[in-house]
């Protein structure tokens, strides 16, 4: 289970159109969790 997003969570992401196919969130969230970093990487669609 993922920890909750809080006010201290670092939010980063990839923006674009289309962005739904990007593997970046999967890749980055995997290493963030493995490193114990309070962060989330999300896709941003305009």
Image: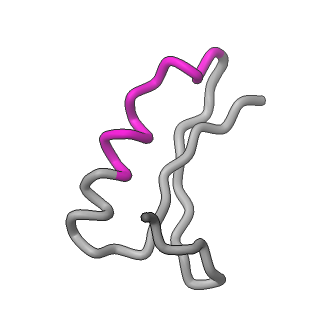
Residue occupying image coordinates x 66% and y 18%: 17
Whole-percent x, y for residue 18 in the image: 63, 15
Residue occupying image coordinates x 61% and y 34%: 15
For the C terminus, the quadrant is top right
The range drawn in magenta is: 18-29
* Residue 28 shown left or right of residue 12 in the figure: left
The residue lying toward the viewer, choosing from 18 and 4, is 4
* Residue 9 shown left or right of residue 24 in the figure: right
Residue occupying image coordinates x 53% and y 38%: 14
Whole-percent x, y for residue 19 in the image: 58, 23
* Residue 7 shown left or right of residue 8 in the figure: right
How many marks are shown on the rendered structure?
A: 0
* Residue 16 shown left or right of residue 25 in the figure: right
Whole-percent x, y for residue 26 in the image: 37, 39
How is this picture coloured?
Answer: one colour
Residue occupying image coordinates x 58% and y 22%: 20
For the N terminus, the quadrant is bottom left
């Amino acid at each position: 289970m993922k920890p909750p997003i809080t006010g201290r969570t670092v939010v980063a992401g990839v923006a674009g159109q289309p962005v739904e196919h990007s593997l970046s969130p999967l890749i980055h969230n995997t290493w963030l969790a493995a490193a114990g970093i309070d962060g989330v990487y999300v896709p941003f669609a305009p």
